[in-house]
Image (cartoon, rainbow, N blue to C red):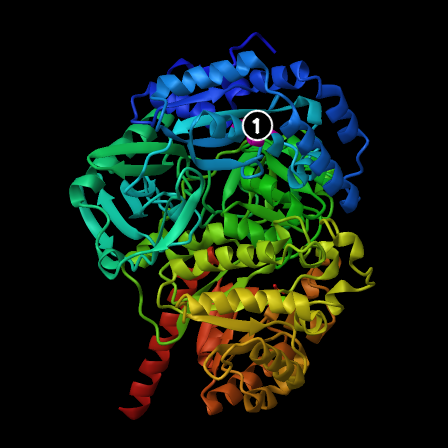
Amino acid sequence: MKEMPNVLWLEEIKKEDINSVGGKGASLGEMTAIGLPVPKAFVVTAQAFRRFLVEAGIEEELFRRLERLDVDDNGALESVARDVQDIVLAAEMPDQIRQEIVDAYERMGADGTVVAVRSSATAEDLPDASFAGQQETFLNILGESNLLDAVQQCWASLYGARAIYYRAKQGFDDRSVNIAVVVQELIGSEKSGVMFTSHPVTGEPLTIVEGSWGLGEAVVSGSVSPDNYVFDLRSERVVDRLIAEKEIMIIPEGKHGTKTVKLSAKQRTAPVLSDAEVARLATLGKIAEDHYGVPQDVEWAVVGDDVFILQSRPITTIKRPEIPHGGAAGQQKGTLGVVLLEGQGASPGVASGRVVIVRDVKDTSDVKDGDILVTKMTNPDMVPAMRRVSAIVTDEGGMTCHAAIVSRELGTPAVVGTKKATKLLKDGQIVTVDGEKGIIYEGAVEAPAPAAPTAAPAAAAAAPVITGTLVKVNVSLPEAAQRAAATGADGVGLLRIEHLILGLSKTPGWYIENGEEETFIAELYGGIKTVLDAFPGKPVWVRTLDAPTDEFRNMEGGEDEPIEHNPMLGWRGIRRDLRSPDQFRLQVEAFKRLWAAGYDNLGVMFPMVNHPGEFIKARAMMKEWGVDVETATLGVMIEVPSSAILVEDFIRAGIRFASFGTNDLIQYTLAIDRNNEHVAEMYQPKHPAVLRLIDYAISVCRESGVECSICGQAGSDPDMVTWLVEHGISSVSANIDAVPRIREAVARKEQQILLDAARRNA
Ligand code: PEP
Ligand code: MG
């Protein structure tokens, strides 16, 4: 590591300093350099941290303890993390470093300058390598001693249990991981929020600004529904605005920390931004976008007449037509070049890149932005890497496997069930993946420009086709909520909450065992709320946990999961919640808090029910925990043939809705494992037995006036949906990418039914 000062001001930071200042510090430096109004800040460099470790004489002891640690031994992990953090906190900060931090703070304006102190972790070759959120941030720090304390606490947070575990699992050597600390003037924001410099789905020149009162944490964490303004960069006008009911704001509290306060009735509904302010923000956003060359996701704040930009990073959801993407409508199978491999096209789009074979979650640290991730089957630990890649290829799985579901939500092309991708493809090889046709080509081949731009969802949102049958959307990742809402869907027919939990790398049991129930509830609450906020006034059916035990195995706490010969037929869905009341209670607590916060659009759906007794018992437990079960919208998935056959009894038991989980219903009706590529061609959604069960359940629901829906993958198939509309289904729920074509299929069938009726009566 070259000689580097202990402290660097933003104005002094150059691009190549990223290893010293971390991704956060480098990006603030770059924004300052292009003239964006960034609040004053300096960075305590990674080298300062290393000097501290050496001069305080704690380096060897600390690394020795970490090296001896088995991170899978939870007790040892917690205790070593605590000890190592204590060592860092107890060590004396060298005078030189202390003095430089104090001097810099004085230059900032000294007494009375309130700062935010943020960690910016780096690895030697991967600056800011996916460590986001694992180290501490301290807002509202005032005075020298509080500042020095906060810096040292940021350093110590590099050794939190979660951070140590994550690095070990990602294959990082603790000795090569550093931490820089950004000390930035805390803007006492009167208002703040985020903006997308271009439309996040279509890439159109529309700046979307979201804003609320107080500090930006409220909008970023999703704890408030912000106002939404759309600024057209072509006409330079605000073309749309939605003034939300903003219930709370986050403000600094005293000399340390923040607090949440309720807003007055007047502030709640008052617009946060004037048109002139929106225009000013959009102009700054444009500067950032022009500089970085790609649309940006920007955090901003306003104090009096001053506007500040706090952060800018690329938006990842836009599908740019210049990249060979987009399904190439009308193209014949294999016309793009030499076909290496075929499988099932599980998530549309075409992308080229370098193959990285991932055999173990540790290998995901080799995965770089834009690579093609090739693996036997993805699992929840791989989601951070799945976010970075341009396409995903698996050996195993079908259209409803983990890789398929997550890729569709991320908008990343994917081909699953190739049987031999990990054997046939080689690390570093360049290939092109067509996620619609299910083909992997040799080399980087050019796909024809998409026949229709990928703006379909937004076009649908702008001029929605009205259908009598509701067309809803499935969501698994909260980050996909905005894209899902942009389709103009009539609500969410399935929110799979296990993805909120699986991404945390700990089992529900771990949270319960370790007294971390509140953390678990907060994660669920935050994730679900993000989705509810994206669908104001529209129904959102949240499904209780449904993860087979094998999906929990790699997580912390996973060692306690039973080994099952057939997890698909095992301890999952409602049957598990009923026998693990604590796990169920924590979910119900999150729902209760959301209902109490006014989210009346939240409905709860129980998975894998096979007898009405399960519904009755689940409802009784919710009642015991204080839920008003008479008014709550509670329903079930029909995924097991028995529940279709007994649907009348379910209705008598009081379900308010039923939704076909065809992914499971097909496998349980036909005895075909949905994830087994060897029998994939026998997995027939339109098998007469499956259709007969569905037809029967629809007709019983219709007679009783109970909403009947579908949220399995078959609900994204226009032919199947046409059949379902003909047979009287009341709503359908499709994947994000499929909503426009499903809406069209529904509308067409409905028109035909009306026309036929009119002709009969003529
Ligand atoms: C289904 O079974 O159709 C369903 C939607 O649930 P999952 O795919 O999560 O099992
Ligand atoms: Mg299912």
Q: Residue at x 70, y 66 (%)?
A: 682
**Regarding ligand 1, which quadrant of the image does it lie in?**
bottom right
Camera sees residue 325:
yes
Specify the principal SS of the magenta part: helix
Which residue bears the numbered disc 1? 152
> How many numbered dots are placed on residues in this image?
1
Viewer-closest of 245 and 605: 245
Q: Return the x and y of residue 391 as percentages of the image width and height.
A: 57, 41
Q: Residue at x 65, y 37 (%)?
A: 160
Q: Return the x and y of residue 544 as percentages of the image width and height.
A: 59, 67
Q: Amino acid at mark 1?
A: Gln
Magenta-drawn segment: 151-155
Taking the image as shown, residue 193 lies to the left or right of residue 54, namely: left
Residue 275 against residue 154 in the figure, above or below: below
The N terminus lies in quadrant? top right
Q: Residue at x 24, y 49 (%)?
A: 272
Viewer-closest of 137 and 743: 137
Taking the image as shown, residue 454 lies to the left or right of residue 152, namely: left
Viewer-closest of 682 and 223: 223
